[in-house]
Image: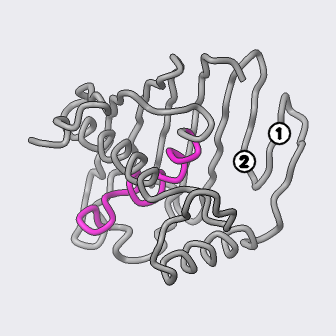
C-alpha cells in the first residue's frame, strides 16, 4: 500500500456478552470494550494514530442495567497522512455485523465475514466457527500464565507486546474523551489530553 492510506473500519452490533458489558462504568462502553480490536487492526494496517475527534449518541432511556451509548462515530488521523473512520453501534437487536474496509492505491480491501476480499474477489477465508478466536485466547492465556512478554527473537504465538496494547487503549480512551467533550480534537501524541 502507498504511504498515504485511507481506512474505514465499521463495527455494528448489540448483543451484550455479559451484564458488565452493558454498563459504561464497568466496560468503558462498546468502543473501549469491543472496538479496541478494530483499532488494533487499524494501527497494524495504517500505522500510528496521531489524533482523534469523536461524537456520541447516548441511549435516550438509560437504566441501571443498560447505559452504554447507542453509537459513537470516530475520526482518526494517521501518521502516514491518511484518515480512518470507526463507527460502533449498540442499537441492533439480536444480531450483529462487523466490517473493516481499507481503500488504498485505487483498491478496496474488505475484511468481513471472516475473510478478505480485494476488489470484490475473495482471496482468503478464516477457519469456520470460532476456531481462530479459540487459538487467540489460548495464546493470550498462555502468555499470562507464563507472566512475560515475548522477548526479542521469540517466535511464539504472542505477536504484540503489552506496550502496543497500551497505545491502542490510549487511542480508544482518547476517542471517548473527545466524544464526551463535544468532539474536541485530541492529540494522541500529547499525554496531557488524558488529564482533565
In the image, residue 147 lies at what x, y percent?
45, 78
Quadrant showing the C terminus: top left
Count neighbours of disc 1 (C-alpha within 10 A) and say few if under 14, some if 14 to 19, many if 20 or more. some
Q: Which residue is mark 2?
A: 112
Of marks 1 and 2, which one's residue comes earlier in the chain? 2
In the image, residue 144 lies at what x, y percent?
48, 78
- Residue lying at 64% horizontally and 69% vertically, measured from the top left: 136
Q: What secondary structure is marked by label 1?
A: strand
- Residue lying at 46% horizontally and 48% vertically, measured from the top left: 89
Residue 70 falls left or right of residue 134: left
**Is the residue 190 above or below the residue 104 in the image?**
below
Spatial distance from mark 1 to mark 2, Cα to Cα? 8 Å
Q: Quadrant of residue 10?
A: top right
Asked whether residue 24 is drawn in magenta, I would say: yes
**Is the residue 172 above or below the residue 101 in the image?**
below
Q: Quadrant of residue 42?
A: top right
Residue bounds of the magenta highlight: 23-42
In the image, residue 111 lies at what x, y percent?
72, 44
Q: What secondary structure is marked by label 2?
A: strand
* Pointer 1 with pointer 2, Cβ within 8 A: yes
In the image, residue 122 lies at what x, y percent?
89, 42
Q: Which residue is mark 1?
A: 117
Residue 49 falls left or right of residue 159: left
Residue 94 falls left or right of residue 70: right
- Residue lying at 62% horizontally and 73% vertically, measured from the top left: 139
Amino acid at each position: 500500500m502507498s504511504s498515504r492510506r485511507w481506512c474505514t473500519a465499521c463495527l455494528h452490533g448489540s448483543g451484550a456478552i455479559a451484564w458488565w458489558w452493558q454498563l459504561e462504568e464497568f466496560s468503558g462502553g462498546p468502543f473501549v470494550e469491543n472496538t479496541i480490536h478494530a483499532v488494533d487492526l487499524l494501527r497494524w494496517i495504517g500505522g500510528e494514530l496521531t489524533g482523534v475527534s469523536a461524537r456520541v449518541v447516548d441511549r435516550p432511556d438509560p437504566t441501571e442495567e443498560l447505559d452504554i451509548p447507542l453509537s459513537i462515530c470516530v475520526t482518526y488521523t494517521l501518521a502516514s497522512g491518511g484518515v480512518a473512520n470507526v463507527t460502533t453501534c449498540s442499537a441492533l437487536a439480536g444480531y450483529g455485523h462487523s466490517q473493516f474496509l481499507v481503500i488504498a492505491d485505487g483498491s478496496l480491501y474488505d475484511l468481513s465475514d471472516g475473510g478478505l476480499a480485494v476488489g470484490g474477489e475473495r482471496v482468503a477465508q478464516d477457519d469456520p466457527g470460532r476456531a481462530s478466536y479459540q487459538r487467540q485466547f489460548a495464546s493470550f492465556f498462555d502468555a499470562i500464565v507464563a507472566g512475560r512478554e515475548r522477548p526479542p527473537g521469540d517466535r511464539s504465538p504472542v505477536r504484540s507486546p503489552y506496550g502496543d496494547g497500551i497505545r491502542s487503549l490510549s487511542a480508544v480512551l482518547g476517542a471517548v474523551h473527545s466524544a464526551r467533550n463535544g468532539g474536541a480534537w485530541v492529540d494522541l501524541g500529547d499525554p496531557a489530553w488524558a488529564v482533565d
